[in-house]
Image (cartoon, rainbow, N blue to C red):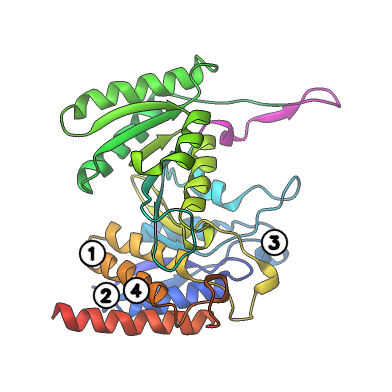
Amino acid sequence: MAHRVTLIPGDGIGPELAEATRRVLDATGIAFEWEVVDAGEATIATRGTPLPDEVLESIRRNKIALKGPITTPVGSGFRSVNVGLRQALNLYANLRPARSMAGVQSRYDDVDLVIVRENTEDLYAGIEHMVGRDAAESIKIITRSASERIARFAFEYALANGRRKVTAVHKANIMKLSDGLFLEACTHVAADYAGRVEFEDRIVDNMCMQLVQKPDMYDVLVLPNLYGDIVSDLAAGLVGGLGVAPGANIGEDGAVFEPVHGSAPKYAGLNKANPTALILSGALMLRHLGYADIGARVEEAVRAVIAEGRTVTSDLGGSAGTREFADAVIDRLGVTAGAAA
């Protein structure tokens, strides 16, 4: 039976990346039915909203979606579609692996981190207002239930993927009630995994310094929403940048897989964008669907193409286009499939 997947092409370079990724995933031999729906800046003119109801309805129906990058205005305009999706669908866990890759320029060659970010509350709850004319207030929400839920997700991920340690990241030395509650919840959940997964905690500013100095000391990090957003970009920087950083948003009743980078509208339609992050997000989707071996094959095909360096996009030092990069990954998948057979 074919897997029916919601495909959201996105803004800017999104449609090109989505098409490249769709071709790679179809080349795995798994049967997909792609239900294409539009969200983002372009839908405002036609629908009056960047997140039409039928997008949410499609994901609720199919339980899984692959999404290209979507433009989020800074300071004004509509609120983030990404945040809207996560909150509307209760996609409480944001998963962002960061692993060094041969052929991608970086200061490190041994980074292997997984960032687990709570996705539904904290300052991202969007409870903010003006206080008079010259001050604004945002309210930070941390609950025990959401904190324990994301901590348990991190420990279960560690167990399922052979990871050795979970580090809770917080600012409980200053925000003793909110971040203190997050740390207390993580510590409580950690007791259920004693002897199986190591647990520790770090203050967020110290964590950022240590990731720059010695990233090899860390494994799975679990964080509240805002710190998770910031630290996951830092981790992506350790392995070459957002262009190679996949992401997943997972809940009890659905999951959305997406790259972390933006929509880069000035490169739209030029066949220049690097599809690595979205293809690797597709590999995460395969694992989520139960195809761990095939997901690993897709990831290794991407890594092999980049390491070889002959058919890579300009940001990786080559001259290939988006389509040609995808072709090379598909060719490599054929080689690995033959070797597996």
Residue 282 lies in quadrant: bottom left
Marks 3/2 in contact by CB < 8 Å: the verdict is: no
Residue at mark 2: 30
Secondary structure category for the residue under label 4: helix
Q: Secondary structure at mark 3?
A: helix
Classify residue 28 by image quadrant.
bottom left
Q: Could you tell which of marks 3 and 2 lies nearer the N-terminus? A: 2
Name the quadrant of the C terminus. bottom left
Mark 4 vs mark 1, CA separation in Å:
20 Å
Magenta residues span 121-136
Q: Is residue 65 left or right of residue 78?
A: left
Q: Say whether disc 3 or disc 4 marks the residue closer to the N-terminus.
A: 3
Specify the quadrant that holds the N terminus.
bottom left
For badge 4, the amino acid type reads Ala
Q: Is residue 340 above or below residue 93?
A: below
Please say whether residue 118 is visible from this viewpoint.
no
Q: Residues within 10 Å of mark 2 (few under 14, many from 20)?
A: few
The reply to whether discs 3 and 1 touch (Cβ–Cβ < 8 Å) is no
x, y (%) of residue 165?
27, 36
Residue 44 numbered mark, or none = 3
Q: Nearer the viewer, residue 126 or 316?
A: 316
Q: Secondary structure at mark 1?
A: loop
Kind of residue at badge 3:
Ile
State which tag comes first along the sequence, 3 or 1: 3
With 329 as the anchor, is 339 left or right in this view? left
Out of 191 and 50, give the one closest to the viewer. 191
